[in-house]
Image (cartoon, coloured by chain):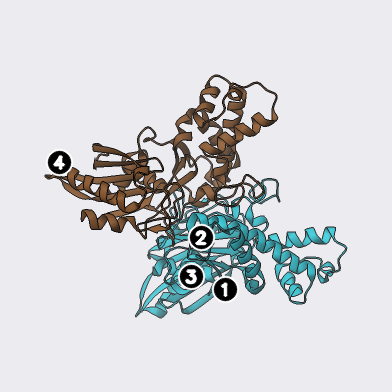
Chain colours: A brown, B cyan
Amino acid sequence: MKIAIGLDIGGTNTELAWVNSKGEILKHLKLKTKNFPKPEQLVENVGNAILEGNNEFSSDKILGLGIGAPNGNYYNGSIEFAPNLGWKGIIYLAELFKQKIKLPTKLTNDANAAAYAEMLYGGAKNMQNFLVVTLGTGLGSGIIVNGEMLYGSTGFAGELGHTVVDYNGRTCGCGRKGCLETYASATGIVRTVNDYLATTKESSTLKKLTNIESKDIFLAAMQNDNIAIKSINYTGEILGKHLSDYVALFSPEAIFLTGGLAKAHQLLIPPTQKAMNKQMLNIFQNTVKILPSQLINQNAGLLGAAAMIMK
Amino acid sequence: MKIAIGLDIGGTNTELAWVNSKGEILKHLKLKTKNFPKPEQLVENVGNAILEGNNEFSSDKILGLGIGAPNGNYYNGSIEFAPNLGWKGIIYLAELFKQKIKLPTKLTNDANAAAYAEMLYGGAKNMQNFLVVTLGTGLGSGIIVNGEMLYGSTGFAGELGHTVVDYNGRTCGCGRKGCLETYASATGIVRTVNDYLATTKESSTLKKLTNIESKDIFLAAMQNDNIAIKSINYTGEILGKHLSDYVALFSPEAIFLTGGLAKAHQLLIPPTQKAMNKQMLNIFQNTVKILPSQLINQNAGLLGAAAMIMK
């Protein structure tokens, strides 16, 4: 049996898994990223875990290691200036792992990994052109064109979250204003709710909370809280309107939503699809669907890191 | 010698050429598109010209026919609802030509053809990721990703001109509002000048003209006409600002400008580049140049139609 090893490095958790060609996880380890203040410590520790784990699969063909990480650069196998990881500068992590475990190693960013996962193990199995949009703390995307990941000349292509909705809009972590991710993300919807709460006299169960999270908003919306519903609709409208632009550019078969905010896809997709269709250029009408990721309840980044190697 | 035949069908002129692998035109015919009220008449007439012309190249290997046309669909070999050609509905032109001339025939839209030309014969010879933006009556684009044309699932991908600058902006021929091409195109800059002229008391040589064209604006700008200069700068600012979004999506090595409006690239590129750099996301700073097409004084659509076959 062919096996690929996936490593998903996140701000909080780092997960490691041995995955087969069907996307089944055969062995799974979870670590705290903060236990490795230096990347060399992570390589040493996780590398040893890989070498040890591989012994359990001595009769199988282990193809290599795929790594998904924030600010990952596929071309360089590097993590570049990742504020969430607390590692400084440019770290050539793929090369460090390759030396340690003596197996082919590739690295990509977490949103691209999610797109690899959708392609191999999820809803995009027979698609040549599709987008995966991850709505988490920020908005990431993996864009597949002609069956291949779009990396562009730098390796950083696909920054959908930093295309601009409003040049005078909300300040973004990137230092500019009005980026899509300041509206359409788990963080963005919380900002929207807080904006409404600051200006409305309407009652809302959300007013009682001191630190609102996106899941609180969905729970409130299910109980018909008007502020929560308005905030979800507003998020969907902005996202959908701008997705119509990306359809004009990429003409994908489907757009898959994933990440924390997408877990409430029953509430989020209808206003998003409606806004997208309303704004869509004629020739693209009815050519594209917005779908929840088929892997939405799994760690798509982890599966995708393995899928990149399996592919 | 290998030869490809290129056919460029425009609203006014239809051009036919036999092109070698260096992009040299060996034989060239020009026809009036209006002489063919029905597409079958064009196929009959141009088809006969091709069969006759091929006799001159009997010792060469003629690879086939490439067609560039407005609203061309690569997948279907069709021209679909092209208002400028006066032909109705969907016309499967590639198939009609194939039957007539018994040679492999492909069809694409005119902006994609320009991108093929830049890739094979122009400034993008060694590039895997680049954009060609044609600033003519509208704004068209050809987008190359991983060395391949981006067609998307429908064949219509790359509609940069119909991504939206301002949802409450200028009405567009597509029925929506504020599309990029209503600002950044030969037609767009004329609208900008007319807007300025309607509201200013400033003197301008352009006030004397009854039917302003983009070239009048450039001539006036060269003579330091302030309205003309302001209009070019405004066009460049809108174009550049939005190109920074497309860089975030595609991360191209270069963006080539072509078409009527780009003939004044000495005036247009500086404000465009400045606005793009100002708005650019950090990681893409200094990764992409805006360049005039190397084929700006040739018929890139015609060369590109041939290049599609040569490739």
Question: Which element is circle 3 on?
Answer: helix
- Ranked by sequence position, the earlier of labels 2 and 1 is 2
Mark 3 crowd level (few <14, some 14–19, many ≥20, 10 Å Cα) = many
- Horizontal side of residue A301 vs A81, given as left or right: left
Question: Which element is circle 2 on?
Answer: helix
The residue singled out by tag 2 in the image is B284
Chain of the residue that carries numbered disc 1 in the rendered image: B
Chain of the residue that carries numbered disc 4 in the rendered image: A
Comparing marks 2 and 1, which lies closer to the viewer?
A: 2
Q: How many marks?
A: 4
- Cα distance in 3D space between marks 2 and 3: 23 Å
The image shows residue A210 at horizontal and vertical percentages of 57, 28
Residue depicted at x 55% and y 54%:
B159
Check whether the beta carbons of the residues at disc 2 and disc 1 lie within 8 A of each other. no
The mark found on residue B296 in the picture is: 1
The residue singled out by tag 3 in the image is B118
Chain of the residue that carries numbered disc 3 in the rendered image: B
Report whether mark 2 lies on the same chain as mark 1: yes
Corner quadrant of residue A32: top left
Instruction: Give the vertical position of B161 relative to A127 (above or below).
Output: below
Instruction: Give the vertical position of A220 relative to B101 (above or below).
Output: above
Let me know if residue B98 appears in the view.
Answer: yes
Residue depicted at x 67% and y 72%:
B267
- Cα distance in 3D space between marks 2 and 1: 27 Å
Report whether mark 4 lies on the same chain as mark 3: no
The image shows residue B165 at horizontal and vertical percentages of 64, 51
The residue singled out by tag 4 in the image is A56
> Which amino acid is tagged 4?
Glu
